């Protein structure tokens, strides 16, 4: 033990307030030199307060469960995992501040999050400059992994960024195929919230819908800070559309659906994973019956691989539901745990001095059977699992109606 640690202990003893822990007396750059082990922090960035907190808290709890599971199993010898959750309130500026804070904590070797693609845009370079790996369970904008020109020329920009969710390059067209081929809808009114996620998703949906022979009856953009969509609802009614596609999130989608129905347009509102939340149904009310959402992966409750996760989540007694991204958040955290294990195993059972760089490098080849199925990443850092599910509101709850992959 080093001299400054002895001085700190002497001072604490004189104050009568010394608390010894398994790893707390070791300097941050002294990896695995005593029998107590090393603490590794998994950071979390998500909206823990505000309109999207239902999804954010589900992410936080699921990562916490992964860390607890790894510790109980002693999955990485000599390593104890803890989590540090920061609230971005779905704001890019807060996300960037959180990224800087997590980078400054040398015990952080991986971060799960964020929820919002727009927040991710503000965080990626901060993490990449620090060689700190980031795994999002929810970001779906293709540009995050494949560059701004992804539609014509894919190029990976940040080697530290990965995600377990599939992208809107698949999700939007998947919804279009369902509406044309299964729901037999031919005329759509497209609305988005002008944000990175919503506008991008609406764009990929619209392109595929038209390619399949559908007609766009009208387009509109909403102000995400508003809750009065009556003018747009009237336009939807007069357009003659037989379906509405909304690119955005549930805090606006719920009231939008309710007001469209109130205006006399008895047609379904359809969106992506951003509206797939029980809170959408609460906000939309009884007229939400028949509304649709796509979400990443297969329904967790129906996956044999997810039974243990669902049971353990319940046993831990979390107050909030794991929501749409619970399984993906657990798998994102477990991917970090696997990468840490690889770095430790390759360094004679202890963390290397350049642990962040080694963990980031190891992430590219991580592969395991997770809660959501096979977890691995392609050359862009995207999930190799491309499955999606369409859900419909039935009897006040989301019910899966079709799972599959985009065939384009």
Image (spheres, helix red, strand yellow):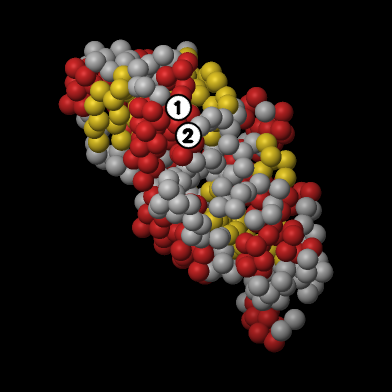
- Spatial CA distance of label 2 from label 1 is 6 Å
Q: Along the horizontal axis of the image, is 231 left or right of 393?
A: left
Task: Indicate the position of residue 201 as horizontal and vertical percent values.
Answer: 39, 37
Q: Nearer the viewer, residue 330 or 235?
A: 235
What residue is rendered at 58% in x and 32% in y?
A: 387
For mark 1, does the 10 Å Cα neighbourhood hold few (<14), some (14 to 19), or many (20 or more) residues?
Answer: many
Note whether residue 95 is visible.
no
Task: Indicate the position of residue 86 as horizontal and vertical percent values.
Answer: 48, 54
- Where disc 1 sits, the SS reads helix
Q: Along the horizontal axis of the image, is 142 left or right of 159?
A: left
Q: Nearer the viewer, residue 80 or 210?
A: 210
- Is 209 placed above or below 59 here? above
The reply to whether dot 2 and dot 1 touch (C-beta < 8 Å) is yes
What residue is rendered at 25% in x and 36% in y?
A: 221
Q: Nearer the viewer, residue 158 or 282?
A: 158
- Where disc 2 sits, the SS reads helix
What residue is rendered at 29% in x and 42% in y?
A: 194
Q: Nearer the viewer, residue 375 or 77?
A: 375
Task: Indicate the position of residue 103 as horizontal and vertical percent values.
Answer: 52, 66
Q: Point out the image quarter for the N terminus.
A: bottom right
For mark 2, does the 10 Å Cα neighbourhood hold few (<14), some (14 to 19), or many (20 or more) residues?
Answer: many
Note whether residue 171 is visible.
yes
Residue 211 picture quarter: top left
Q: Along the horizontal axis of the image, is 85 left or right of 121?
A: right
What residue is rendered at 24% in x and 26% in y?
A: 218
Q: Count the marks.
A: 2
Residue of label 1? 175
- Is 184 placed above or below 304 here? above
Residue of label 2? 171
């Amino acid at each position: 033990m080093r001299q400054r640690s002895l001085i700190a202990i002497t001072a604490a003893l004189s104050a009568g307030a010394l608390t010894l822990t398994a790893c707390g007396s070791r300097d941050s750059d002294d990896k695995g030199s005593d029998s107590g082990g090393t603490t590794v922090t998994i950071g979390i960035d998500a909206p823990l307060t505000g309109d999207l907190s239902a999804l954010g808290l589900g992410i936080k709890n699921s990562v916490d469960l992964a860390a607890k599971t790894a510790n109980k199993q002693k999955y990485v010898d000599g390593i104890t995992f803890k989590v540090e959750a920061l609230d971005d309130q779905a704001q890019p500026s807060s996300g960037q501040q959180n990224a800087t804070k997590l980078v400054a904590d040398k015990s952080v070797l991986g971060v799960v999050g964020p929820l919002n693609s727009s927040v991710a845009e503000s965080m990626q370079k901060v993490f990449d400059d620090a060689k700190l790996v980031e795994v999002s369970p929810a970001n779906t904008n293709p540009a995050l992994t494949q560059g701004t020109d992804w539609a014509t020329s894919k190029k990976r920009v940040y080697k530290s960024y990965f995600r377990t969710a599939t992208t809107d390059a698949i999700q939007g067209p998947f919804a279009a195929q369902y509406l044309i081929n299964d729901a037999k809808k031919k005329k759509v009114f497209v609305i988005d919230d002008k944000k990175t996620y919503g506008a991008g998703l609406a764009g990929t949906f619209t392109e595929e819908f038209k390619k399949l022979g559908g007609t766009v009856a009208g387009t509109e953009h909403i102000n995400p800070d508003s809750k009065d969509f009556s003018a747009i609802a009237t336009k939807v009614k007069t357009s003659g559309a037989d379906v509405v596609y909304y690119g955005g999130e549930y805090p606006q989608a719920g009231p939008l659906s309710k007001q469209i129905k109130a205006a006399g347009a008895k047609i379904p509102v359809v969106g992506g994973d951003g509206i797939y939340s029980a809170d959408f149904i609460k906000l939309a009310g009884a007229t939400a019956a028949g509304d649709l959402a796509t979400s990443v992966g297969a329904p967790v409750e129906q996956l044999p691989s997810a039974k243990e996760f669902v049971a353990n989540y319940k046993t831990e007694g979390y107050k909030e539901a794991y929501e749409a991204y619970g399984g993906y958040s657990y798998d994102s955290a477990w991917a970090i745990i696997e990468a840490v294990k690889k770095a430790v195993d390759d360094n004679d059972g202890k963390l290397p001095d350049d642990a962040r760089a080694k963990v980031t490098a190891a992430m590219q080849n991580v592969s395991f059977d997770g809660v959501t199925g096979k977890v691995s990443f392609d050359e862009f850092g995207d999930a190799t699992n491309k499955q999606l599910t369409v859900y419909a509101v039935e009897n006040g709850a989301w019910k899966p109606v079709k799972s599959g992959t985009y065939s384009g």
